[in-house]
């Protein structure tokens, strides 16, 4: 059986709704790295929101058919609904400045018809270094090599 | 999309070949070539019908496949980057260059496909 398509119009429409409704967010983590050309593997797409749970975000999510589950003692913040199955919410970005500072340096990447803000690759490197987790440190050589390539092309 | 016979002749001449010699060198029979020249559209019916249904030009549905020249150029570029950055991993360079040739959405899909395999 063929593998199901990943990142189809459903996901593109979800992101388009967030952008169109004025939600301040950006793609971070290895999905952001992959969008910029890094040969990195990821299972999901991490989104960093400027203001989690604010009315603009909730309204946009509702429009996209997605619910927001706030964090509790037993769960992190979640996006629930078919269009958001590939997406996770990031609560804290290690080693980085404020959302606004990082948003000002973000790259705008065309993903289908959506102009998507994406954490800059050199800042992804900084955040991976700062977490110190083995899985983040393991990908650092790939990120750093790709950064040299992309900067030089 | 028609085969441009004049362009084929001109390009062959620019390479110092007659069209006949170019066809022979490519292993393409004259019969096959002139049969294609007579067709109003060399694209398969499938592509033409799908394009008509979608209301787009057939060319909009086509994707350029990388040629050996593309790979040679990429290899040269990868070697050059490796020479300028001692210690850099060739495979990381090669795969990054390969991904840069793809649109961002396709880069993301590849990453997710492998991550979820």
Image (cartoon, coloured by chain):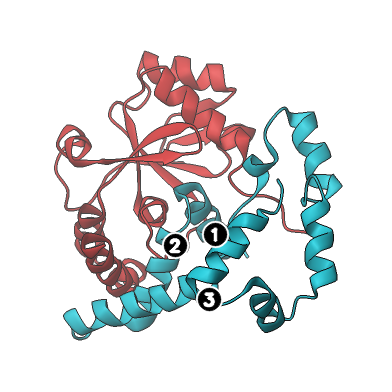
Chain colours: A red, B cyan
For the residues labelled 1 and 2, say whether their Cβ atoms are less than 8 Å apart.
Answer: yes
| Residue B13 image position (x, y, % from top left) | 53, 70
Label 3, label 2: how far apart the Cα atoms are? 17 Å
> Seen in the image, is B4 located left or right of residue B83?
right
Of badges 3 and 2, the one in the foreground is 3
Residue labelled with disc 3? B68
Pick the front one: B31 or A72: B31
Residue displayed at 28% across by 74% down: A141
> Seen in the image, is A12 located left or right of residue A91?
right
| Residue A134 image position (x, y, % from top left) | 32, 72
Host chain of mark 1: B
Discs 3, 2: same chain? yes
Q: Secondary structure at mark 2?
A: helix
First in residue order: circle 3 vs circle 2: 3
Pick the front one: B73 or B42: B42
Specify the quadrant that holds the C terminus of chain A. bottom left
| Residue A149 image position (x, y, % from top left) | 27, 67
Label 1, label 3: how far apart the Cα atoms are? 22 Å
Asked whether residue A48 is in view, the answer is: yes
Pick the front one: A27 or A152: A152
Residue labelled with disc 1? B110
Residue labelled with disc 2? B99
Asked whether residue B88 is in view, the answer is: no
First in residue order: circle 1 vs circle 2: 2
Residue displayed at 37% across by 50% down: A32
Host chain of mark 2: B
Host chain of mark 3: B
């Amino acid at each position: 059986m063929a593998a199901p398509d990943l990142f189809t119009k459903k996901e593109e429409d979800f992101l388009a709704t967030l952008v169109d409704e004025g939600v301040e967010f950006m793609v971070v983590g290895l999905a952001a790295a992959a969008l910029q050309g890094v040969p990195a593997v990821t299972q999901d797409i991490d989104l960093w929101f400027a203001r989690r749970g604010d009315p603009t975000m909730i309204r946009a999510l509702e429009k996209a058919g997605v619910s927001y589950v706030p964090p509790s003692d037993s769960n992190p913040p979640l996006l629930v609904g078919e269009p958001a199955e590939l997406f996770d919410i990031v609560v804290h970005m290690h080693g980085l400045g404020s959302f606004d500072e990082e948003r000002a340096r973000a790259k705008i990447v065309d993903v289908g018809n959506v102009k998507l803000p994406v954490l800059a690759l050199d800042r992804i490197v900084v955040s991976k270094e700062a977490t110190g987790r083995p899985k983040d440190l393991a990908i650092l050589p790939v990120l750093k090599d790709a950064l040299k390539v992309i900067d030089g092309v | 999309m028609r085969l441009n016979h004049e362009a084929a002749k001109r390009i062959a001449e620019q390479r110092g070949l007659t069209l006949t010699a170019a066809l022979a060198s490519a292993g393409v029979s004259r019969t096959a070539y002139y049969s294609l020249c007579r067709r109003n559209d060399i694209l398969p019916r499938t592509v033409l019908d799908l394009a008509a249904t979608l209301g787009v030009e057939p060319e909009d549905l086509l994707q350029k496949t990388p040629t050996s020249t593309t790979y040679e150029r990429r290899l040269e570029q990868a070697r050059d980057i490796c020479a300028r950055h001692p210690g850099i991993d060739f495979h990381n360079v090669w795969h990054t260059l390969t991904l840069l040739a793809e649109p961002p959405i396709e880069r993301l899909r590849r990453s997710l496909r492998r991550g979820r395999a």
